[in-house]
Image (cartoon, rainbow, N blue to C red):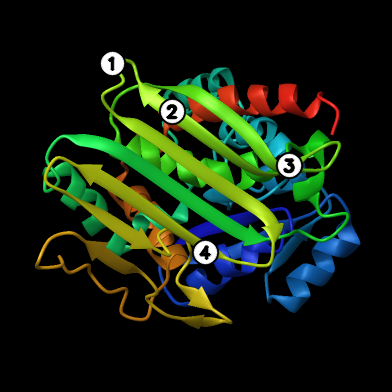
Amino acid sequence: MFSIGLLSTAKINIEALLNPVRRRDDCQITAVASRHWEKAQNYAVHHTIPKAYGSYQALLEDHQIDAIYISTPNSLHSSWVKAGLEAGKHILCEKPLVCSYQELTELKNLALRQNLLFMEAMHYQYHPALIDFFRLIDVGILGPLSYVSAKLRYYRPPVGDIRLDPHLKGGCLMHLGCYCLDAITRIIKHPLEFTNLHLTERTPAIDLACHGTLTTTNQAIKAEFVCDFSGEVFDSEIKVVGDKGEVLLTSALNPAVIQGFIHDIFSLKTTFPDIPLLSSGKGRNTYDFQLDYFISLLKEKDHTPRLNEQATILLEKGSILVNDLLKEPM
């Protein structure tokens, strides 16, 4: 039985970890930490968690905890991943894992030295339908690739939300673009460079929607992404074009949960006469499959870091471009 601690009381905890843990018998949430003890205590009582801590460090000092799930604001990921690894904990950290390639390299090396699992919670990729989708591309069903796009739109965060706070590494690129860049780099297994990035919606301090274009060094494959939380829509897609045809996976980056109920919402369209079948989740969602994978690695003692270096490089470069654009007057 693996013991997991929650480092923060973020809203995402419920769907991403609390609910999936309740559906299995090989792990349990044994503690939660907040920067305020009363908040942690109320959270623990509400979610029937045995222990509550009034600081993140106190959680890390609990020797009965095997792994921690980090769901702090983006700007705090790196420091608490480092602290968790130094405390001997396996790490499942919300996306984006870190905000720079240097941070990623340092933390990856620390995890390897400590022989601890260090995994980014990029949940969408663990659903069987997405595993099938990426496998179709990898086996060459489309032939040589020429174009890949990823789009993700999400509801506009309310005023005061941490996702709108530039000091906490908020903005649509960090929160939504990380998914798009993860998908693009998993399909295009070559280094990419930005050819353009522009903001289509913004406030004076934060990006609300942006459109980026990229290309491989030899310009053989072009890519683009759109990330947007300026409206009232939640949808996503991944499109891949090759010499032999194209595929379009809708709802590709969405968790398979609609109003609290689990559904397979993925839809594959292709130019082929026979549409390849994607596996069903059979009533389980992307977060269930992510936890499956994390726990299976712990059981197998496979502590190879699970992260995406190319996506992190692009996210860092894109963030620099966004910051430059935000300095320009509206």
Q: As rendered, which of 88 and 233 lies closer to the eye? A: 233
Q: Which residue is mark 2?
A: 214
Task: Measure how far apart labels 1 and 3 are at the Cα level.
Answer: 33 Å
Describe residue 231's horizontal placement relative to residue 4 as left or right.
right
Q: As rendered, which of 56 and 196 lies closer to the eye? A: 196
Residue 152, x across and y down, in percent: 53, 54
Q: Which residue is mark 4?
A: 235
**Do the residues bearing badges 4 and 2 touch, measured as CB atoms within 8 Å?**
no
Taking the spot 18% from the left edge, 59% from the top edge, the residue there is 271
The answer to whether residue 95 is visible is no
Residue 205, x across and y down, in percent: 84, 36
Q: Which mark is on residue 125?
A: none
Q: What secondary structure is found at the residue carrying circle 2? A: strand
Disc 1: CA contacts within 10 A as few (<14), some (14-19) or many (>=20): few
Q: What secondary structure is found at the residue carrying circle 1? A: loop
Taking the spot 42% from the left edge, 71% from the top edge, the residue there is 285
Q: Which mark is on residue 218?
A: 1
Taking the spot 63% from the left edge, 62% from the top edge, the residue there is 13
Disc 3: CA contacts within 10 A as few (<14), some (14-19) or many (>=20): many
Q: Amino acid at mark 4?
A: Asp
Q: Which mark is on residue 170?
A: 3
Residue 72, x across and y down, in percent: 71, 47
